[in-house]
Image (tube, rainbow, N blue to C red):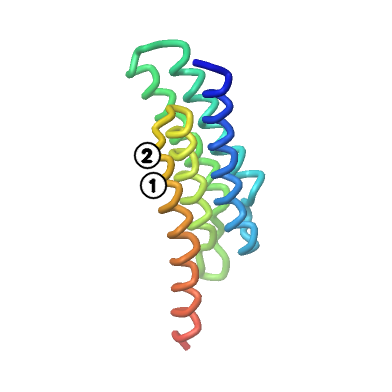
Amino acid sequence: MSWMDVALRLGAAALLGALIGLDRELRHKSAGVRTISLVTLGTALAVLAATSMTTDAAASSRVIQGALAGLGFLGGGVIVHHRRNIEGLTTAAAIWTSAALGGACGMGIWPLVVIGGGLILALLIIAGRIEAVLGQTKH
């Protein structure tokens, strides 16, 4: 694998993580640009390292499974129970899906990266606006 390919994969992961984190940051959530960028970049690094060391698909799969399971705990840390409301679920989901996106970047599966990243961003932005409108009309 060339230096340029590695830079592209890691750069894409960091950039997409920053965009997803920016959405969370602008909404004043507990995880923002730095956290989610590090999640996507870290997962891409782990996947890239695993796929570079072996051609065994099962070994690479275990790395991805471990990263996604471990990041479930990080996501759990942003979920807060506050006065009968549970907050942080969307941010936890953003952390987890960002890890999956980082894994796709690490593997260089570009259609998955582009479509998945676009859908994640669209859901965060568009669904957030829909929820805001619905929240205003519930009274």
| Residue that extends furthest to the top in the rendered view of this protein | 54
- The label on residue 61 is none
Mark 1: secondary structure: helix
Q: What residue is shown at x 43% (from left), y 38% (from top)?
A: 100
Q: Residue at x 55, y 51 (%)?
A: 20
Q: Position of residue 123 (x, y in %)?
A: 43, 60
**SS at mark 2 in the image:** helix
Inspect the image, locate mark 2, and give the three-letter code of the amino acid beneath it. Answer: Pro
Vertical placement of residue 20 versus 81, above or below: above
Mark 1 neighbour density, 10 Å: few (under 14) some (14–19) many (20 or more): few
Tell me where residue 18 appears, x and y as whole percent. Answer: 61, 46
Residue 101, quarter of the rendered image? top left
Does 54 sit above or below residue 70? above
- Residue 116 versus residue 87 in the image, above or below: above
Residue that label 2 marks: 111
Image mark count: 2
Which residue is pictured at 62% across the width and 51% down the height? 31
- Disc 1: which residue: 115
Measured as percent of width and height from the top left, residue 11 is found at: 58, 34
Nearer to us in this view, 14 or 89? 14
